[in-house]
Image (tube, grey):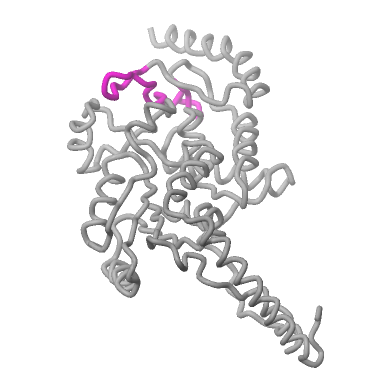
Amino acid sequence: MVETDRARAKAARIECQAEQEAAVRQAAEAPVMRSRGVFGIGRTPVAGPIAWGDGGDGYMYRMDGSRIRWPGIVARAREIVDGYEGGVTLRQVMYRLVSEGRLPNTPPMYRRLSSRLAQARREGRFPDLIDTLREVHVPPVWPDAGAFVGEVPDWFRLDRTRGQEHAVYVAAEKDTLRQLLTGWLADLGIPVLVVRGFGSQSYVDVVRERTATDARPAVLLYVGDFDGSGTDIERDWVLRTDCWARTERVLLTHDQVQAYGLPPAEGKRDDPRWPGFARTYGFDISHPVQWEVEALEPAELHRLVLDAVDPYIDRQVLTAVIADELRQRRELDAFLNRWPGRQGG
């Protein structure tokens, strides 16, 4: 009986090998792979997490018997990185691959992906990734005072939210979104808060003090995962800061999960907030699921964030502030041009 089962499993893997190799070549045309399992979301069923198992030979297999084929995974990961402007982290790549059903959401698989992509980078087959935790911290230096003075005008910047009716903040649940959000919102001058889970009281105090010094009503636009802990992190943050005239969850929401047909990743069974979350949205409590913000295509994520911010921006006021900033920068540049030995003056 055991030998027969093994023979059938082997035959299934051989049979689907050609299909898997074809899928590798067509990764861009068919980026999403879903399982046969279904979880109810309201009245709309969506594909459930891919079922994975150990085939006993050192490889992970999907429920259809197909093995993870790393050349295809690396190729798809490269497409994901190329789709982001300004770089992407390993964890963001992992989220996207998990959401597409290509990898199981486990720490060992995360480490294996890291190893495979690192090898591809060493061989020149993969672009660099952002590492937000490991940096070379070097004090700023200049060859001489002239070089320093030459850079000063480029640093000058006015508060581009000056004159706007509301003080708008965009909060991210996790640090993997920080670089994307700060890049998208820099031209508007909108501050980005990184909550990082259940935020520390010190950080809460910093935000409260900052909003208290601004007479304008403060607005919080929140970006976080759609899962039990993600929604509770938002609730906790809003409750403890208690300084917002208005709050809005920009991403992810129940409606967005349905509208985009986002496939869920397997959730954490030990999350104490999962049962209540499941009951609220009608999920199967015995099968924890979660949706990561990074499951959205970066261009769509970008659009949704800017669309949420746009109603709070008076473009005429912003244009006037930028014009004033440029005028003062030119005056500063002209003044500093008199510095002896200035480079680039």
Q: Is residue 38 magenta?
A: yes
Q: Does the rendering let one see residue 66?
A: yes
**Residue 79 location (% of width, % of height):** 64, 36
Toward the viewer: 113 or 77? 77
Please determine whether, in this image, residue 26 is positioned above or below residue 198. Answer: above
Give the extent of the magenta segment.
37-62
Please determine whether, in this image, residue 60 is positioned above or below residue 310. Answer: above
Residue drawn at 65 percent across, 45 percent down: 119
Residue drawn at 26 percent across, 37 percent down: 269
Res 332 quadrant in image: bottom right
Toward the viewer: 94 or 221? 221
**Residue 143 location (% of width, % of height):** 76, 85
The answer to whether residue 292 is left or right of residue 129 is left
Q: Is residue 203 magenta?
A: no
Toward the viewer: 221 or 90? 221
Q: Does the rendering let one see residue 53?
A: no
**Residue 223 location (% of width, % of height):** 39, 48
**Residue 261 location (% of width, % of height):** 42, 25
Please determine whether, in this image, residue 28 is positioned above or below residue 166. Answer: above
**Quadrant location of the N terminus in the rendered image:** top left
**Quadrant location of the C terminus in the rendered image:** bottom right
Residue drawn at 79 percent across, 86 percent down: 342
Res 5 quadrant in image: top left
Given the current orientation, which residue lies at the most extreme bottom position?
340
Residue drawn at 25 percent across, 48 percent down: 232
